[in-house]
Amino acid sequence: AAGCARDAGGDAPVVGFSQVGAESEWRTANTRSVRSAIEEAGFRLRFSDAQQKQENQIKALRSFIAQRVDVIAFSPVVESGWETVLREAKAAGIPVILTDRSVDVSDESLYVTLIGSDFVEEGRKAARWLLEESPLRRGEDREGPVRIVELQGTVGSAPAIDRGKGFREVLGDDQDYRIVRTQSGDFTRARGKEVMEAFLKSEGGDNIDVLFAHNDDMAIGAIQAIEESGLRPGEDILVISIDAVRGAFEAMMAGKLNVTVECNPLLGPQLVDAIRAVQEGRELPRRIVVEESVFTREQAAEVFPSRQY
Ligand code: GYE
């Protein structure tokens, strides 16, 4: 029956959602958005947290298949290794919707659509700010190349691969900008701080101009490491990150983060629309993209009150 199944009763669809984890502010906002949109739609939700481990996600997907849920949605922690379990879902006739992160599969029919951001473009925006807008932009007089360190996201994850790619694409082969160190901080504050400490202690660590962090949480951890080493984040080392969560706005208003590229986690409503389309047998585009912008320290105080995550 059509209409509002707000009581989540009888024939409301059962949605199995496998989440990456709770590694960042972005992720908790994403979980909140998915949970509340599904609840509001009157669907029944089976939620599973993978704690950033693919094996946990594969188990969760198999359990959703065994329970014969109506739709599976998941945010794949890494890109590769999904063929087998997705074929099992297909054989069981359960449609799969990807949210946030993409998978690398040869058979396109293994999922219906991907709802999420263009991570390559986010990486490009980060580099464009550095090259065109920052105090270290192109054409300013200085001695020697700009030395950049990079805190990558989870190894093998779509956002880590794509943000790194987009950033490098814009730097091109300009020898004035060099990535001198790169390592994963797994998208968490704690790892971001640890890895930044190691960068600062390594050879040439007293000569870092820019930190590019693949998310705000790692940047915030790294900011602490920079301060503890006696340097001023945002001044002695420019800090660039991605997500635009509240913590980033606070860091920008304190002058410690220079810029954050927006990555919108509020995917719940679009997920609900996609589930409805699947249930009603309507066609969906293969890719549903989210509109996003870039925020600097100068804009932070003005924009902060209107932020939703
Ligand atoms: O940027 C990061 C999170 O997949 C886009 O995962 C997401 C990323 C986000 O942990 O903060």
Image: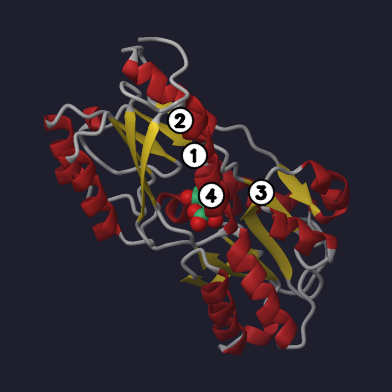
CA distance for labels 4 and 1: 33 Å
Q: In this view, does 78 lie to the left or right of 33?
A: left
Q: Is mark 1 on a helix, strand or loop?
A: helix
Q: What element carries label 3?
A: strand
Q: Quadrant of residue 89?
A: top left
Q: Nearer the viewer, residue 138 or 206?
A: 206
| Residue at x 43% of width, y 54% of height | 161
Q: Mark 3 points at which residue?
A: 261
**Residue 231, placed above or below residue 117:** below
CA distance for labels 3 and 1: 22 Å
Q: Which amino acid does label 4 sit on?
A: Glu
Q: Which mark is residue 169?
A: 4
Q: Mark 2 points at which residue?
A: 271
Q: Is mark 2 on a helix, strand or loop?
A: helix
| Mark nearer the viewer, 3 or 4 | 3
| Mark nearer the viewer, 4 or 1 | 1
Q: In which quarter of the image is residue 189?
A: bottom right
| Residue at x 59% of width, y 89% of height | 201
| Residue 200 rendering spot, x and y as whole percentages | 62, 84
Q: What element carries label 4?
A: helix
